[in-house]
Amino acid sequence: MCQSSCSNETHTGQRDLDDRTTTTLTSLVKLLKGRPHLSQSAVEFLLGQLHLSCDSSRVLMCHALAAIATHLPVLGDGMLGDLVDLYRVASHSSTDKQQELLVSLATVIFVASQSSLSAEVKTVIKQQLENVANGWTVYRIARQASRMGCHEFSSELYQSMRTRVASEHFYFWLNSLKEFSQAEQCLSHVEDGDYSGAMTAIAEALRSYQKGIASLTAASTPLSPLSFQCEFIKLRIDTLQALSQLICTCNSLKTSPPPAIATTIALASGNDLQRCGRIAMQMKVCMDEFRSLAARYADLHQSSFDADYATLRNVELQQQSCLLVSHVIEALILDPQAASFQEYGTLGSVQTESEYERRMMSVFSRVLEEVEGLTKKHPPVSHLHTGCLCDAVIALLKVPLSFQRYFFQKLQSTSIKLALSPSPRTPSEPIPVQSSQQLTLKVEGVVQHGSTPGLFRKIQSVSLNVTSVLQSKTGTDLKIPLDSKTNEIEQRVEPHNDYFSTQFLLNFSVLGTHTVTVEASVVDESGIEWKTGPRTTVSVKSLEDPYSQQLRHQLQQNAAQPAPQRSAYARF
């Protein structure tokens, strides 16, 4: 009994020590954000303490090291050797703390390696994983490798885990991750100035991505539809296709240059784009495609209410890269005079939160500097302009894509369930309503949360948008076309104890069948609206009221009666 009491006191003391260590290291990370010049000495001190601390403290120190090095590149190659040596002796058992230490140390090594792991480092990590790591630990390390851009290593780990899972869905999930990692690994071999090699690498990456999206679709279930993952990968595929098409368009300047009289034609027609020949219209198509991709990335961002901040920032960077390419096309080829670089002038002063963001922002700044210098010196269009465009594409491809946490893990879960009344007796039957009356549509809803509600953002109110569209007409009014909106109302309601209710008055004066759509979106505490859904539809059939029907019949009967014939005696 005394031994049990001592054991409890030991556990309590260790827990208190871990809490104090966590508080201290969290404060240190926040301090170094404001005092970045102290980061180098702080990192060296923590590395020295790693060899002397117990496993639980080592895990906390590794978390702090990763957080510091993520914001500032202070973990150099010289420190990598110490980390690898520590990894060799890090674990000799399969306890939870030892498994956590393997993941934490691997994360710090990935950050220090900056997306390029040497053969020695990979061998050391694999040996430890084979000796003492369980399957969950291997998966977590592979996940961190994907996040840090070490795609070759993550692909090998996913490959080794595929046959070690008990579910078919897990197999397809791991297979899709392996294909995505292989696709990104293909892009890592792109070299500056090798435009043909870039197109070959994109083609190989697209093949792996197509295999991966098929496996990802097979891995989805009704309870886990993987909507964000599927849309993110589809956008990545479309972005790579657009980049490949842009390189092809640039190469067409060599095969089909503007005619000698292009300048004369441009002056005569008043269309300045004619001076560039057929490449101008092709470039406009490319520019519109990248703007469309940027809009789709914005939609994905707006629908990801439960995503963590790093994931949302990653989506923003993809959107900004598409906007950058469209801006470069406009500045170099389509409209150099109207192109402005002032809105991009603050890129260099933006506070970056990760190595991936730091590298992307560096590419953005470098590309804009080259484009601005070229537009001032040379009029379009020449091989210098198309070469600058292709160089921008390669610079973007060479930054390893980061798969952030929300792609693998959902820490916050929020969903809304809607109920409409009146509701039809059967799903295919429309709700009848007389055209002279208004329909009162009551919308009730419940907000459902996961285990950690409001971890990243909280719901302030729910925005309900109700629209009705005319699907078919039974009357003779030809002025109102089909598929035209007959109602459009929006209301915001604040949930109380995760419940909300409101009513809408809808007018269906046009006879026929209408489709009523109720779409919910949430507004967070910052006033930002998120398109979370759901979207519910119901059919309404507008019927003629009895009085109008009787009046119409009388008019039809009067019109159908023959007019009296006039005779010579009609006047008397």
Image (spheres, grey):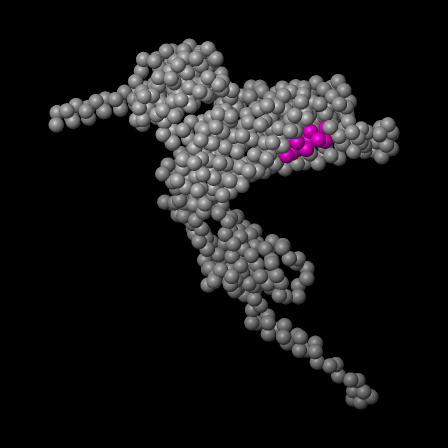
Q: Which residues are magenta?
A: 241-250
Per the picture, the main secondary structure of the magenta-coloured stretch is helix
Residue 105 appears in the picture as rendered = yes
Give the percent coordinates (x, y) of residue 215. Answer: 51, 40
Q: Decide which of 152, 297 is in the foreground and name it.
A: 152
Residue 21 appears in the picture as rendered = no
Residue at screen point 42% across, 27% down = 141
Residue 144 in which image quadrant: top left
Q: Is residue 462 above or below residue 433?
A: above
Q: Is residue 4 above or below residue 418?
A: above
Give the percent coordinates (x, y) of residue 326. Answer: 66, 30
Residue at screen point 72% across, 25% down = 386
Residue at screen point 36% across, 27% down = 133
Instruction: Decide if residue 449 is on the left or right side of residue 235.
Output: left
Q: Decide which of 141, 73 is in the foreground and name it.
A: 141
> Extreme left residue here?
1
Q: How many numbered dots are placed on residues in this image?
A: 0
Q: Quadrant of the C terminus?
A: bottom right
Instruction: Decide if residue 555 is on the left or right side of residue 48.
Output: right
> Is 242 a magenta residue?
yes
Give the percent coordinates (x, y) of residue 115. Answer: 51, 21
Q: Is residue 408 above or below residue 152?
A: below
Residue 266 in which image quadrant: top right
Q: Decide which of 408, 131 is in the foreground and name it.
A: 131
Residue 359 in which image quadrant: top right
> Is 441 a magenta residue?
no
Q: Quadrant of the N terminus?
A: top left
Residue at screen point 37% across, 36% down = 452
Instruction: Decide if residue 152 is on the left or right side of residue 283.
Output: left
Give the percent coordinates (x, y) of residue 156. Answer: 48, 28
